[in-house]
Amino acid sequence: LLVFDHVWSEDSLKWERFCAPLKYGEPGSKILVTTRSKKIAEMVGNPIPLGGLDETSYWKLFKKCAFGSEDAGEFPHLEAIAKMIAGRLKGLPLAARTVGGLLKAQMNEKHWRNIAGSEIWQLPQDEKGVLPVLQLSYQCLPSHLKRCFVFCSMFPKDHPFNKRELSWLWMAEGYVAQDNNMTTEDTGSRYFLELVNRSFFQEAPWGSQYVMHDMVHDLA
């Protein structure tokens, strides 16, 4: 099994040249391509559209992201709002992580109702396919985190980020504020962890580094 993840090149000639030697693989070999481009899916052949999670599974995931566990019993005044928001996210795991992180940042009813009542829910996806809910997560960032997040757009998609190295780069750009109670490096690390907690970064499968989902990268 050979997997190509997040394929973006729509050049059919390049794709044919790349796949030519793969036609001589062992019988039973398979090639799996994942992409958000309908054109690429049709070009490769036999596309399988993927839907969102079912309602029950999605609600469990959303509760874990927004409340920190699958049990929301500690916050009965927030559960109904959470269900209303989760119902708008079309079963998308990335949206659950991002919105859940946004809600979890302030566990109070006013903040949650402001998120639920935002006009951004009415907007369509932009030309890059960025979900409005991701734009909402960005808009709710403090200004110092917005600068740090946008800075990451200079790196290519799927770039592995190291917390310390990225903090140093932010410091060099003057993005990290002075704090009498913390070193500048510790403050930069705190900024990074705040973005992790809001799901702008995800821990890489190999550990010790972090990656940014391609849709989040598009947002940056």
Image (cartoon, helix red, strand yellow):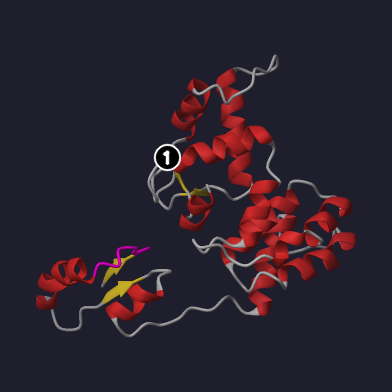
The residue lying at 65 percent from left, 72 percent from top is 58
Q: Residue furthest bottom?
A: 46
The residue lying at 53 percent from left, 79 percent from top is 51
Q: Which residue is mark 1?
A: 154
Residue 210 position in % (x across, y down): 46, 45
Q: In this image, 82 relative to 139: left or right?
A: right
Q: In this image, 110 relative to 181: left or right?
A: right
For residue 82, above or below residue 163: below
Mark 1 surroundings within 10 Å by alpha-carbon count, few (fewer than 14), some (14 through 19), many (20 or more): few
Quadrant where the N terminus is found in the figure: bottom left
Residue range (magenta): 5-11
For residue 83, above or below residue 44: above
Q: Residue furthest top?
A: 180
For residue 117, above or below residue 162: below
Residue 27 visible (yes or no): yes
The residue lying at 61 percent from left, 38 percent from top is 146
Q: Is residue 200 magenta?
A: no
Q: Secondary structure at mark 1?
A: helix
Residue 34 position in % (x across, y down): 37, 70
Image quarter for residue 114?
bottom right
